[in-house]
Image (cartoon, helix red, strand yellow):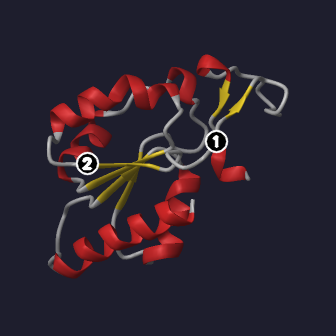
Amino acid sequence: MKQIIIYISAILGLFSGCKPQSNKTTDITTSIPPQKYFIEQLIGTETPINVMITSGNNHANYEPTPKQLQAITTSKIYVKIGELGFENIWLGKILELNPSIIIVSLSDSISPIYGGESCDHDDHHSHEEGIDPHIWTS
């Protein structure tokens, strides 16, 4: 996980040093609000961050809004969890909309937790292939 944070910080540092002060682009797109929080802790709040699944929405039946898809076209980086079903479904469309976007998966160096036993939710939803995608809670 430490390697991923260093990697993201390095990429974001490159982009934040080169951007004009007044831009209307979204430099980063991420999957969920906890990721936005962690990114802001690393780089501050000046860089616009597009969050795909906003609070109150469910990743199991999520579909991006036209505004979110438009924000993806101007994003330089997409930071994904790596095991959310919607990411796998929409990744092709994201790359189609923005072929130059850099995809960073936060779960690359993390061993997944399998099975529903370790996943305690209020909404009791299931996960694709029995993988608990909630890596931000550990």
| CA gap, disc 1 and disc 2 | 31 Å
Image position, residue 93 (x, y; %):
25, 28
Circle 1 sits on which residue? 111
- The crowd level at tag 2 (other Cα within 10 Å; few <14, some 14-19, many 20+) is many
Image position, residue 55 (x, y; %):
58, 44
Q: State the SS at label 2.
A: helix
Q: Are marks 1 and 2 in contact (CB under 8 Å)?
A: no
Q: State the SS at label 1.
A: loop
- 29 left or right of 117 in image: left
Q: Earlier in the sequence, mark 1 or mark 2?
A: 2
Location of residue 20 with respect to 127 vertically, above or below = below
Q: Residue at (69%, 20%) from the top-left corner?
A: 126
Locate residue 114: give its quadrant. top right
Instruction: Report the disc number at residue 71.
Output: 2
Image position, residue 73 (x, y; %):
18, 45
Q: Amino acid at mark 2?
A: Ala
Q: Residue at (64%, 46%) from the top-left corner?
A: 135
State the residue in front, 25 or 2.
Answer: 2
Instruction: Report the disc number at residue 23.
Output: none
